[in-house]
Amino acid sequence: MIFSTSNIKKSFTTGEVSEEILKGVDLSLAEGEITALVGSSGSGKSTLLTIAAGLQPASGGEIQFDGEEMSAMNQEQIRKIRAQSFGFVFQSAHLVPFLTAEEQLLLMLETAGSPLTKKQRREEAENILGWVGMGHRKTAYPASMSGGEKQRIAIARAIVHQPKLLFADEPTASLDSTKSHEVMELLQKLTKTLNIATLMVTHEEDMLAYADRVITMKDGRLA
Ligand SMILES: Nc1ncnc2c1ncn2[C@@H]1O[C@H](COP(=O)(O)OP(=O)(O)OP(=O)(O)O)[C@@H](O)[C@H]1O
């Protein structure tokens, strides 16, 4: 397993009341697999995803990534891993409005500290845009794209630096059924071809057909 958590706990304190949201979660993710995380609203899915992605600390437990103890790292080490080895897709694409499709990808390569030359980066961006079926729209701005196209660019941007883990939080929630299936087919293809470990939170039952594993969260625990 490229990624695993052991006994992850998370409590939030509001005023004098402390509530335990995650009550000891063991989650493992395998390369080339989509793991879907489902469960009722408030069960702790987003909290688990953001802790796994190093976006907020756990209150207890351990996180292992690629043979390293992530839970023992400082903020700067975690930031570096996140930039270089993790990719993110959200419900809405969050594209930068004043950048073209190609520039969105180039910015990500820069942020990830890509070792590629400028020319290689452009080639890589073009290559990935082709993969997601957006090669013909490389000079397009987000304002001229449909919702499905924007999400394709967001996915291209999430994987252009060849991450090992991909976190997808409700990636199809803003799309109609046809577009949702297209986006899931794309995520499945990329997960397999690039051997990425993908963790996806979803509320949509239809999308579970694309998952290799479905894990249900209930009251802060994995069922
Ligand atoms: N920063 C925070 N401070 C206090 N409580 C929080 C915080 N973040 C999350 N919670 C609480 O933790 C619980 C779980 O939230 P979380 O967003 O993880 O659930 P979820 O399963 O993703 O829900 P949904 O499906 O509605 O997105 C909720 O009761 C929420 O109010």
Image: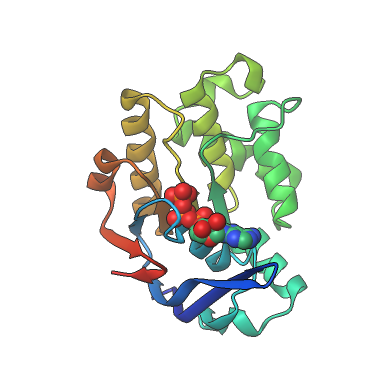
- Using the rendered view, name the quadrant where residue 112 is placed: bottom right
Q: Is any atom of residue 172 visible in this view? A: yes
Q: Check the image and report above or below for 94 versus 25.
A: above
Q: Residue furthest top?
A: 144
Q: Residue furthest left?
A: 209
Residue 18 percent location from the top left of the image: 60, 73
Q: Nearer the viewer, residue 7 or 209?
A: 7
Q: Check the image and report above or below for 105 versus 16.
A: above
How many tags in the picture? 0
Residue depicted at x 27% and y 58%: 214
Q: Check the image and report above or below for 109 versus 198.
A: above
Residue 143 percent location from the top left of the image: 65, 17
Residue depicted at x 35% and y 39%: 184
Residue 219 percent location from the top left of the image: 38, 66
- Using the rendered view, name the quadrant where residue 45 is placed: bottom left
Give the quadrant of the C terminus. bottom left
- Using the rendered view, name the quadrant where residue 195 is placed: bottom left
Left or right? Give the position of 100 relative to 220: right
Q: Is any atom of residue 163 visible in this view? A: no
Q: Check the image and report above or below for 215 versus 72.
A: above
Residue 75 percent location from the top left of the image: 74, 72
Left or right? Give the position of 111 relative to 86: right
Give the quadrant of the N terminus. bottom left
Q: Nearer the viewer, residue 8 or 123?
A: 8
Residue depicted at x 68% and y 46%: 108
Left or right? Give the position of 214 relative to 159: left
| Protein image colouring | rainbow
Q: Nearer the viewer, residue 117 or 198?
A: 198
